[in-house]
Image (cartoon, grey):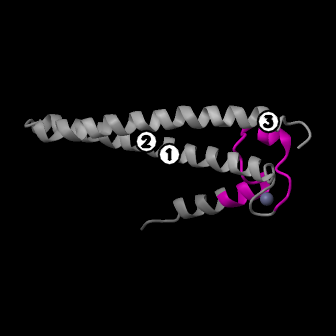
């Protein structure tokens, strides 16, 4: 953890949090607006492309919320002094990994294990 300026990082993360909050607010506003226009529309062809846009909007909003959760968690860990420790095995995450992904909450080993598990679930035969 010696290579990371935690106070600078905290400021950067707090700024990121603020802009994410604005982004999410914006997402919600545009989704709410879309919801209103949807009821006004009477063209069926329009409706399906509109539906897709709404799905994409929801998707983006979910990604933003997800990111916000990670940023918030990283800020909490910084404040509690547990930043840079893997939440699964408690090992140091490593500063090179944190430089690439400041909100990383697991060391590379645990992250890979987790992703392998998810891959297995995703690629499990559906037939
Ligand atoms: Zn770990």
Q: Disc 1 to disc 3, how far (Cα)?
A: 24 Å
Residue for point 64% across, 36% down:
14
Mark closer to the chain start, 1 or 3: 3
User: Which of the labelled discs sits on residue 7, or is there none?
Assistant: 3
User: Which of the labelled discs sits on residue 61, or is there none?
Assistant: 2
Give the x, y percent position of residue 9: 75, 35
Residue for point 77% across, 53% down:
80
* Ligand 1 quarter of the rendering: bottom right
Compared across the picture, whether 39 is left or right of 113 comes to: left
Q: Is mark 2 within 8 Å of ligand 1?
A: no
Residue for point 59% across, 58% down:
119
Give the x, y percent position of residue 40: 11, 37
Few, some or many residues within 10 Å of mark 3 (<14, 14–19, 20+): few
Q: Quadrant of the N terminus?
A: top right
Give the x, y percent position of residue 74: 69, 47
Report the span colored magenta. Answer: 90-114
Q: Tell me the quarter of the picture where residue 127 sits.
A: bottom left
Give the x, y percent position of residue 53: 30, 36
Q: Disc 2 to disc 3, how far (Cα)?
A: 29 Å
Nearer to me, 9 or 92 = 9
Q: Is residue 99 magenta-colored? A: yes
Residue for point 53% across, 59% down:
122
Q: Which residue is mark 1?
A: 65
Compared across the picture, whether 75 is left or right of 28 comes to: right
User: Which of the labelled discs sits on residue 121, or is there none?
Assistant: none
Q: Is residue 123 visible?
A: no
**Callout 1–callout 2 Cβ contact below 8 Å:** yes
What kind of element bears circle 1? helix
Q: Disc 1 to disc 2, how far (Cα)?
A: 6 Å
């Amino acid at each position: 953890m010696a290579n990371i300026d935690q106070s600078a990082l905290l400021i950067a993360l707090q700024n990121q949090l603020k802009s994410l909050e604005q982004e999410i607010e914006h997402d919600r506003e545009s989704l709410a607006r879309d919801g209103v226009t949807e009821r006004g529309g009477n063209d069926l062809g329009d409706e399906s492309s509109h539906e897709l846009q709404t799905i994409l909007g929801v998707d983006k909003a979910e990604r933003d919320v997800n990111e916000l959760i990670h940023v918030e968690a990283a800020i909490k860990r910084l404040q509690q002094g547990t930043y840079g420790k893997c939440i699964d095995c408690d090992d140091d995450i490593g500063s090179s990994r944190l430089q690439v992904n400041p909100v990383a909450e697991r060391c590379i080993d645990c992250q890979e294990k987790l992703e392998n598990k998810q891959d297995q679930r995703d690629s499990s035969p559906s037939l």
